[in-house]
Amino acid sequence: MGRDSNSDLFHQFTNRYRLNGRLITETPLHIGAGNTAADPTTLDNPVLRDAFGMPYIPGSSFKGVWRTFSERILGQWGEAVGVAPCNVLTNPCLSHDDARRIKKEYSKDALRAAEEIYNCLCSVCRLFGSQHFAGRLRVRDLLLDESTWVGFYEIRPGVSIDRDTRTAMTGRFYEIEVVPAGTAFHWQVLMDNLSEPQWYNTLLSLTPFVHGEIALGGGTTRGLGRVRLTNVQVSRLDASNFKQYLQKGWAGIESIPFVDAGKKVGLELGGDMVV
């Protein structure tokens, strides 16, 4: 993973990256809609639906899994190069008390306060955000590619097991609703003002999704939720092409495949990826 530097904050535009692709379910997917006990006709664990009754994946669900994976690989290798992530629960990189102290100390200089807060953050919080600083990336809700929708959900039965007796527990039968394998969703990420190390880390941390090695949603230990990113295209907006963007939008900005974007920063993103 690359080392981050003092990247630009958000008061000035430096660059914007856009990644587009499709997320395909390689095994059935369950992202639950929560408790629906008020309706006795529904399943125990229904799938999250949009206003039209179609399944979708919240951007926060993808971002959360992505962040967790980034923390794991930085926790393994990041310390040696000074980019180890914090533990947001037990040892955050910036406590509430320190944040209040910085804001009070620089109450008349908002930009300086933002710089001081940013400098206290670990590499993951700088990229994905924290309670004290907005993240640099935004994951859009993943909406259904209706051309891949089979028109129905699958039902997976289950039963709770007593760990002491190793037998099925009485009255603990349940049903899980899942999106069938082979269903595709539109995937898009926007990232603002990335430094070169942050862009490098972004590509590296997305590679397992492109390889199909990451699972989303519930029931992943039982085989549910394996997904794969495909047809990923990368576009970069900066001062050199901003005029074209104002005239034509993203249609006027060149896009390149994910693998080629990796080669530009020295990453050989090969293997069994479908891009």
Image: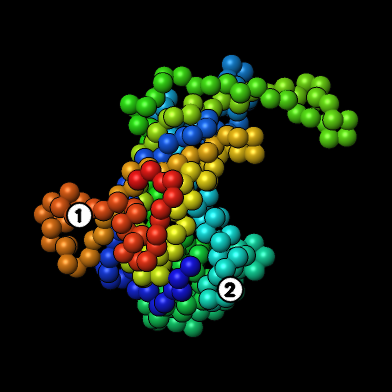
Disc 2 marks a residue whose amino acid type is Glu
From the viewer's side, name the closer residue of 80 and 253.
Answer: 80
Of the image marks 2 and 1, the number of the one nearer the N terminus: 2
Q: Which residue is at a point 46% across and 19% down the rendered structure image?
A: 152
Marks 2 and 1, how far apart in space?
A: 36 Å
Q: Secondary structure at mark 2?
A: helix
Percent coordinates x, y for residue 105 in the rendering: 49, 83
Image-quadrant location for residue 220: top right
List the single residue furthest toward the top. Answer: 41
Q: Residues within 10 Å of mark 2 (few under 14, many from 20)?
A: few
Using the rendered image of the protein, determine whether residue 134 is visible from the camera's viewpoint.
no
Using the rendered image of the protein, determine whether residue 162 is visible from the camera's viewpoint.
yes
- Image quarter of the C terminus: top left
What residue would you read off at disc 1?
A: 254
Image-quadrant location for residue 135: bottom left
Question: Is 179 on the left or on the right of 203, as rendered?
Answer: right
Q: Which residue is at a point 54% across and 42% down the rendered structure image?
A: 215
Disc 1 marks a residue whose amino acid type is Glu
Establish if 190 lies above or below 178: below
The answer to the question of whether label 2 and label 1 lie on touching residues, with beta carbons closer than 8 A, is no
Percent coordinates x, y for residue 122 in the rendering: 52, 71
What residue would you read off at disc 2?
A: 79
Establish if 12 lies above or below 205: below
Percent coordinates x, y for residue 167 in the rendering: 84, 26
Q: Which residue is at a point 44% across and 46% down the rendered structure image?
A: 272
Question: Is 2 on the left or on the right of 196, as rendered?
Answer: right
Establish if 201 lies above or below 157: below
From the viewer's side, name the closer residue of 88 and 266.
Answer: 266
Question: Is 200 on the left or on the right of 47, as rendered?
Answer: left
Question: Is 18 on the left or on the right of 273, as rendered?
Answer: left
Percent coordinates x, y for residue 184 in the rendering: 40, 33
